[in-house]
Image (cartoon, rainbow, N blue to C red):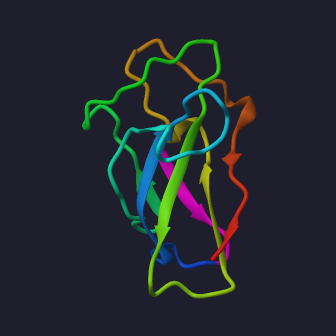
Amino acid sequence: MVVTATGSAVAASVNQLKLYLDDGNGLFSPTLDTALTSGLSFTAKRATFNLVAVGNSQSLSPSTKTFFVAWNVSLSATNNADIGVLVASTADLVLAGASDSVSPAAFPLASGTAPI
């Protein structure tokens, strides 16, 4: 899955991006939710989470799964800026099966932005 940085902050303002699978309560908790990846950084405002490479591939079904993208704020981050993430289109999701597909109806998927 590819996410693109959004907001007024420089993408280097955050690091250690991680993708978490929600434990089912709909609220982010780094101690309860499952970290699927270790820390990444944005490169050219994009970060790629490769779940297969780290042994955490996910099976998706018609039911809902909630994922969270979390990060650390860099010591060099500019104050009074904000940052969020965007999954721009179905092309930003890689599916394993040749006949698998994702409906483009809900895209782009965008988080709100968080202040730094």
Residue 36 locus on image (x, y percent): 38, 38
Of residues 33 and 106, the one drawn nearer to the viewer in this rendering: 33
Give the residue drawn at x 34%, y 57%: 39
* Relative depth, front residue between 104 and 40: 40
- Label count reads 0
Considering only vertical position in the picture, is 108 above or below 101? Answer: below
The residue lying at 49 percent from left, 15 percent from top is 100
Q: Is residue 88 above or below residue 23?
A: below
| Residue at x-position 46% and y-position 12% | 99
Q: Is residue 75 above or below residue 105?
A: below
Viewer-proximal residue among 15 and 48: 15
Horizontal and vertical percent position of residue 7: 67, 70
Based on the displayed image, in which of its 4 quarters is residue 43 positioned?
bottom left
Location of the C terminus by quadrant is bottom right
Which picture quadrant has residue 83? bottom right
Residue drawn at x 62%, y 48% is: 88
Q: Magenta part mainly helix, strand or loop?
A: strand
> Is residue 62 on the magenta stretch?
no
Q: Is residue 40 left or right of residue 29?
A: left
Please tell me whether residue 98 is drawn above or below residue 113 in the rendered image.
above
In percent of width and height, residue 18 lies at 43, 51
Identify the magenta region: 1-8
Front-lying residue, 105 or 1? 1
Taking the image as shown, residue 51 lies to the left or right of residue 107, namely left
Residue extending farthest front: 31
